[in-house]
Image: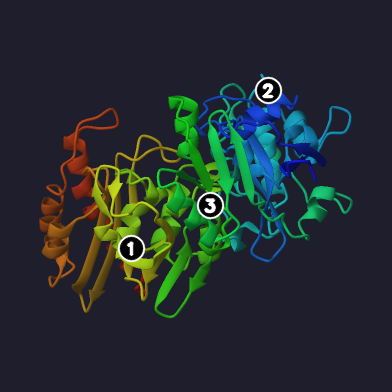
Amino acid sequence: MAADGHELTINGETCSLAGTDPATNALDFLRDRGLTGAKEGCAEGECGACSIMVARPDEGGGTRWTAINACLIPAAALDGQEVVTSEGLGTPDDLHPVQREMAVRGGSQCGYCTPGFVCSMAAEYYRADRSEPAASNGHGADHEHGPNGFDLHALSGNLCRCTGYRPIRDAAFALGSPSDDDGYAARRSSPAPVAASTRLAGTSGTFARPADLAEALDLLAAQPEAVLVAGSTDWGVDVNIKGSRAAYAIGIDRVPELRTFDFGDDRVEIGAALTLSEVERLLAGRVPLLAQLFPQFASRLIRNGATIGGNLGTGSPIGDTPPALLALEATLVLASRDGEREVPLADYFTGYRQTVRQPGELIRAVRIPLPLSGITAFHKIAKRRFDDISSVAVGFAIDVRHGVVAKARIGLGGVAATPIRALATEAALEGRPWTADVVREAADVMRSEGTPLDDHRSSAAYRKAMLGTALLKLHADDTETQTEEVPA
């Protein structure tokens, strides 16, 4: 161990974090040590030029190589961890299979983005079940999956402005399986490193990673203004773009009590510090509304770090998870040194980026009651299909029994200072037939929900129009599904 106990493994070699300021992100830390393959393109997790691989625990007790944005995560958060950069994968004289395929298929021109693509592609290359046929991975055989099982969504969040994506896709689809002597493949069968308990102080402040929830709550009680850092996909942007600094930051991403998961008979409980990618794998499609949400939430690179707790903790009115979780009637478990309390998500938001969470409290888990409604959908209206901030987001959960709406729950984002329930629309649907005429009437009501504003993403009029259209689309899609299920 280093004298101060702070170290990480980079490309198989031990490196000390001694003297690293807590505000230094992993990208700058790596580049300062001559590992310049990873680049800064956007400094907000949108371009992927900074992608690196980290060893994360998988659901079976082994290791999953995971691609993340090095520009967002504090270097201190990698204390005790294992990191692989493009330099660690291969050299000009001994190319890694991913690097070789990118080269021979013309997947690189200027090369600025290439190391990031290589790291994201390598993480998917090492996915343990990648060799399964595409039809068995939950998405079905389609143009987004190669014959080798490669999921192109693994590259979402990586941008290329000069090569074009076809040769990059061709390189991904040409990859075989790792060889028997591939050390990174062999590493998957061993446990991932346990996150180190960390205290790192510098001129900008202090970064602390507690060993467990009790220690985290003690730190938060002593430092009520501390910034809670999990995936740092939001805070990291503030640090890079706005120059924000935290006098005290508490890393809660690896706190065991915040990483629990339980799918019971009457509810699902999701630990607040599980990443969205982990939650997606653990749910395995069993909550269809969330299964629709995940691919539309930023990019795979972001989802590999971002957490549900973080998305709710910011209190943002345009977060993607609140509308879906409002429709699912989720509750939050808030923990402090005084104990725990459960708060309905519908009562959680109190104003713009304001919530009922008190000083000394953090979100421990999200609970979703079971059984689920029969008709669910997540509609995200944005300028891009993927990796974009929504203009409007709508979560639907409708129970129809014998042709009548027994219960309607609709969550809205982007149309008020907080995420809200569409209460008037729910009332306009409940107890009435699930017919086109009734839905058209309810869509008129839905256009009046919230207090949408004009901004650079869309106009208030557009947002109102999209609310009504979303409900009409839900009914049309459900009608089409029912028609397809009726035998000819």
Q: CA distance from mark 1 to mark 3?
A: 32 Å
**Mark 1 sits on what residue?**
376
Q: Relative to residue 235, is residue 38 depicted above or below? A: above
Residue 242 location, x and y as percent? 43, 26
- Taking the view exactly as shown, the residue that stands out farthest to the top is 110
Residue 10's quadrant in the figure? top right
User: Which of the two labelled residues, at mark 2 and mark 1, occupies the earlier sequence position?
Assistant: 2
Residue at the (79%, 36%) spot, across then down: 88
> As drawn, is 206 to the left or to the right of 397?
right
Dot 3 surroundings within 10 Å: few (below 14), some, or many (20 or more)?
many
Q: Are circles 2 and 1 on residues that touch, CB within 8 Å?
A: no
Which x, y percent locates residue 479? Answer: 27, 64
Label 3 secondary element: loop
Residue 253, visible in the rendered structure: yes
Quarter of the view holding residue 161? top right
Give the amino acid at mark 1.
Thr
What residue do we see at 56% from left, 30% from top?
159
User: What numbered label is drawn on residue 111?
Assistant: 2
Q: Which mark is residue 252?
A: 3
Amino acid type, mark 2 = Gly
Whether residue 232 appears in this view of the structure is no
